[in-house]
Image: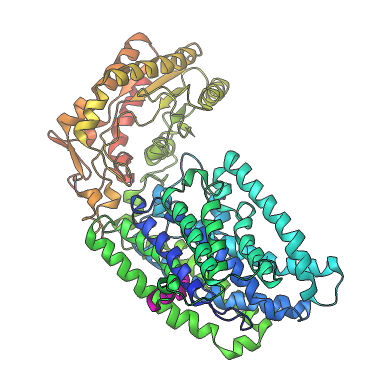
Amino acid sequence: MESATNANRQYGYVKAIDGLRAIAVLAVMLYHLNPAWLPGGFAGVDVFFVISGYVVARSLAGRMNESKVRFITGFYARRVRRILPALTVCLVITSLMTVLFIPASWLSATTSQVGLFAFFGLSNIALVLFQDDYFSPRAEYNPFVHTWSLGVEEQFYLLFPFLVVLGYRVARRQDVAQSTALLGWSLMPLMALGSLYLAYWMGAHHADKAYYLLPSRFWELAAGVMLFQLQDAGRLGKLGSRLALAVLTLGLALIAVGYWWADVQHFPYPWALFPVAGAVLAIHALSWRHTDSHTTLLNSPLMVYCGKISFSLYLWHWPVYTLLRWTVGLESGWSIGAALLMTFALAMASYHWVETPIRRTSWLRERRAATIMAGVAATALLWAVSLQLFQHREALSRSVTADTYTWYPYAYPAASDDASPKPMAGRTLFVIGNSHTGAYSTMLHQLRQQHGVEVRQMETGACAIGNMLYPVNDMPGCRELSDRYLAQVLEQATPGDMVFLASLRTYRLSDQWMRSDPGAVLAHSASETEVERIEQARQETMVWAQKLAANGIKVLIDAPKPVLKAPPYRCSDWFNREHPLCTGGLSVSREYMQQLREPVVNSIQSLQRQLDNVYYWDPLPLLCNQDECPAFDDSGKPLFFDGDHLSGHGNRVLYPGFLARLQQVW
C-alpha cells in the first residue's frame, strides 16, 4: 500500500496512523506465512485501503484553490513519486528472480501476465482475465499476485481528482474548495453505496471479480475519503481523551474481529465491513493526537518505522515468500526466519534508497508534468526489460528444465520428417481427456509427422471423459460437454477412425505443490466407495464406446501410468531438491503401482471383453524397470515432468510402443 506519511502540513503528521499501517502490514505478512496463525490477516489490505483514502483526501486539503490543471497534474505527480519507483524496481527484480529460479509450468502459467500487467496498475484485472476454475495456478506460487491491491488503489487514484473536479463543475463554483461539500455529501457516498452493493452482488455471482476489482472495493477507499471530509467540515465534533480512547478501542476491536474471523470465501462483503469500520474509527480517534498511554504502542518508534516502510514491506514480502516456496520451502523455522529477514532488509533498502530519495527530489517536486512523463517513460522502459526477461526465459533459467526439448511435452518436430509415403495417411485419431491429452503432445506430433495420422486433441478440463476412475456426468456442465464432444466425433469421424481416451486413471501421490501418504492412497483406492465409483465410470465409458461402435469407430484406452511421490521438475535443481515436497523421493516401487492401478486395469479389461471396438494399451512396462518406476531413465533423462504428466523425453520413450499398438489395431 502507498506509504504516504506526508499528510498536509495544515493538519500535521499523525505518527499513530503509521503505527496503524504497521499493524495492517504485519497482519498481512503473518497471514501469508501461515494462514492458520491469523486466519483473517489478509484483511490488513482493507485497513490499508481506508488509510490510503483518508491520507490522499487529507493531502488535498491545502491545494483546493489551485487551477484544475495544476490540481490534477500535482495529484498525479505525487502519486508517481510515491508509488512507481519502488513498485517498478520490485517488479523488475522479481521478474529476474522468477526467470532464473521458477520453472515454467502449470503452477506458474499466469506469472508473466500478472507481472507485466502490474507495471500499469492492472494486475487485478489480469488475475480475473487469466484465471479459470480448473487450470488456475495456486495464488501462493505467483510472485506478483499481491500487486492486485496496488492495482485497485492506482485505479482509484486515476479517478479521484476527476471526482473532485466533477464536484466543482456541478456546483459551478469558482474554486475547488467550495465543491468539496457537494462531493462529500452526494457523489462520494452514493458511489460508495453503489460499490458496497456491487461487493454483495458480485460476491454472490462472481467471487473472483468481487475480490480483485475496483468497483467492489471502491467503498473501502471512499470510507477513508469521507471520514476526512466529515472531519474537515467539522461534522463529527471534537473527541476528548476518554472518548477518543473508547472510539480507538472499538476500532481496534473491529479490526481484530476481521483479522481473526474474516472468511476469504465471502469477501469483501460482508467480512470487510469489520476491518473497514474499525479502521475508520481508529483513524478518527488517532487524528486528534491525544498523548494518552493508549496510543503508546502505535506511537512507538518501531511501529512508526514499520508504518513508514509498510509500502516496501508489502511490495517485497510476497516475492520473497513465493521464491522460497519454489526453492527451499517455507515450512521450517529457519526458512520462515530467513523470509522475514530478507523482507525487512529489502524493504529498508527500498525505502531509504528508492522511495525517499525520489520523493524528496526537489527537481521532481517542482516539475509536475515532467514528473508524470518521466514516470510513464521509466515504467514503460522497465516493463520492456521484464518482457524481455520472460521472453528469454529458456536461455536465462538456472533450472534443468531450461532444456525444454527434454522436459516439456511440446509438439516438437520429429527427428525424421521426409516426404516418403505416410503409411497411416487418411486415418484420424481423436484424443480426448483431461490435461493428459496435452501431456502426449510430443508423441502425437511424431505420429502425425512420420505416419500421416490426422490427430485432433480435445482437452476437456475437469470433465475427464472416459477416465475410468470416477464418473463425470453428474459434475456441473460435464454431461453437456460429453454429449457435445461425442456429437463432434460422430460428425467428423469415418469408419475405422479411432478415439484415444487419455486421462489420469489413478490416484495422485503428489501434486505440483503437495504430496500424499502412499499407504493412505492405496487404502482409499481399494475402498468400497471407490470401487463403486470405478464401476460408474466404466458404465459412462461403455455408453460412449457403444455409440462409437455403431459408427465403426474404434476406442483405445491407455492403462494407468505410474505416478510419483514428488514432481521431478520441482526437485531436480540444486536450489530446490531439498524442498520438503521432495523428501519422498522421485520413484515408486513397481509392485506398489501394480496394486494401486489394479482396480482400474481390471475395469478396462472388462470393458474390452464386452466390446469388440475397445482396445487396451499399457505404457507401464516402458516406464518401469523390474523393481521400480523412476522419474529418470538410465540415461538420466526425465520420463515425467511432474508427479503424473510425461516429459518430452518420456513421450519419445513411449512412442515406439504406442505406434506398434496402433499398427496392430489398424
From the viewer's perspective, is 166 left or right of 359? right
Q: Farthest residue toward the right?
A: 172
- The x and y percentages for residue 518 are 21, 35
Q: Relative to 660, is 206 on the left or the right? A: right
460 over 75 or under it: above or below: above
Residue at x 45% of width, y 40% of height = 419
Q: How was this image coloured? A: rainbow
Q: Quick check: 541 left or right of 175?
A: left
* Residue occupying image coordinates x 64% and y 50%: 196
Placement of 660 over or under 652, stated as above or below: above
Magenta-span inclusion, residue 303: yes
Name the residue nearer the viewer: 608 or 387.
387
Q: Nearer the viewer, residue 7 or 238?
A: 238
Residue 574 visible, this orientation: no
Q: In this view, does 656 lie above or below 239?
A: above
Look at the image and give the residue range highlighted in magenta: 301-312
State yes or no: residue 439 in magenta. no
Q: Position of residue 129 (x, y in %)?
A: 57, 49
Q: Where is residue 350 in the image (x, y as percent from the top left)?
A: 43, 77
Q: Quadrant of residue 121?
A: bottom right
Q: In which quarter of the image is the C terminus?
A: top left
Of 369 and 7, nearer the camera is 7
Task: Inspect this view and state whether residue 409 appears.
Answer: yes
Predominant SS along the magenta part = helix
Identity of the residue drawn at 74% across and 80% down: 70
Image coordinates for residue 355, horizontal then vertical, percent: 49, 79
Number of numbered discs overlaid on the protein picture: 0
Q: Does 300 sit above or below residue 126?
A: below
Q: Residue furthest left?
A: 627
Is residue 526 found left or right of 203 in the rendered image?
Answer: left
